[in-house]
Image (cartoon, helix red, strand yellow):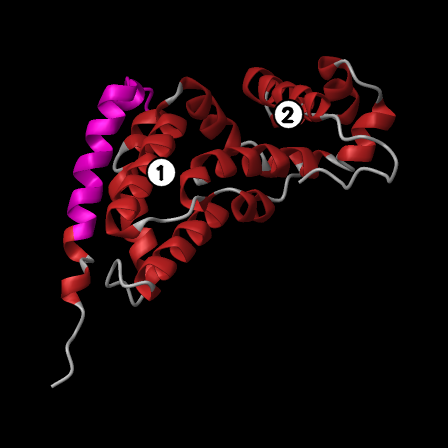
Amino acid sequence: MPNATPRGRPVDRRKDEAILRAVRRVLQRDGPSAVTMERIAHEAAVSKATLYRRYPSRQALLEALVNRDAERVFRALLQPTAGPGGVRTQLEAFVVDLAGLLCGPDHRRYLQALGDLPRAGVDLQGIWRRGPAQAHGRLAAFLASAHANGHLHCDDPAAAAELLLGMAVGLDLVRSLYRVPQQRYRLAARRTHAEYVVDLFLRCYAPENRATDP
């Protein structure tokens, strides 16, 4: 995440966007070793002082990039939930956004770059925590809330979240690594996939599946 902006200095989100776009371009085009503070400052057309004020290291830059992708994926889960129908709608939107990230050409190049991160001195655990682990945690929290409100029967939200993620992702990550064309990249295909996956998931965790007291 970006550092806190000094007091009295207005936040310039455009600079943060320019910086993270530059990180993505350099990472995908030239690999993680090319992601240096000097290179990113040049690519983003910002001063090194501005860059260091927001992101103190290359690790912070890469973690901020995966954090932003994770936030875009779980944005639907942060909205207020209006009953069981709202749960379905939000989960479908989540799967649509997740498939959009995983099936895009940018993510395929990102996955290929992951293998080089350790050699570039990048801590993969930090990347994991900011990206996949955060998305899983947000989804589990959403399911726990739905369970508490009686919208789902989901007494192990962490396991349920992992199951839904597996159903949503399927072989898409493997297809990306093998450069197989992604049929779910188009929005209509993603929506159809999301409806199918969420329908199966909700059948397993419907409120009527709650155990009743004798």
Left or right of 74, for residue 86: left
Nearest the eye: 118 or 193: 193
Residue 78, x across and y down, in percent: 46, 45
Classify 10 Å Cα crowding around label 1: few (below 14), some (14-19), many (20 and above).
many
Nearest the eye: 145 or 82: 82
Q: Which mark is residue 94?
A: 1
Residue 56: image quadrant is top right
Left or right of 7, for residue 31: left
- Judge whether residue 33 can be spotted in this image: yes
Q: Residue at x 56, y 44 (%)?
A: 130
Q: Which mark is residue 211?
A: none
Q: Residue at x 71, y 37 (%)?
A: 2
* Label 2 vs 1, first from the N-terminus: 2
Eye-nearest disc, 2 or 1: 1
Left or right of 154, for residue 80: right
Q: Which residue is mark 2?
A: 20
- Judge whether residue 158 can be spotted in this image: no
Q: CA distance from mark 2 to mark 1?
A: 23 Å
* Part of the protein shown in magenta: 178-202
In this view, 26 is above or below 4: above
> Which of the image's four quarters has the C terminus?
bottom left
Q: Secondary structure at mark 1?
A: helix
Instruction: Confirm whether the magenta stretch covers residue 189.
Output: yes
> Which of the image's four quarters has the N terminus?
top right
Classify 10 Å Cα crowding around label 2: few (below 14), some (14-19), many (20 and above).
many
Say what amino acid the circle numbered 2 marks: Leu
Q: Name the chief secondary structure element in magenta.
A: helix
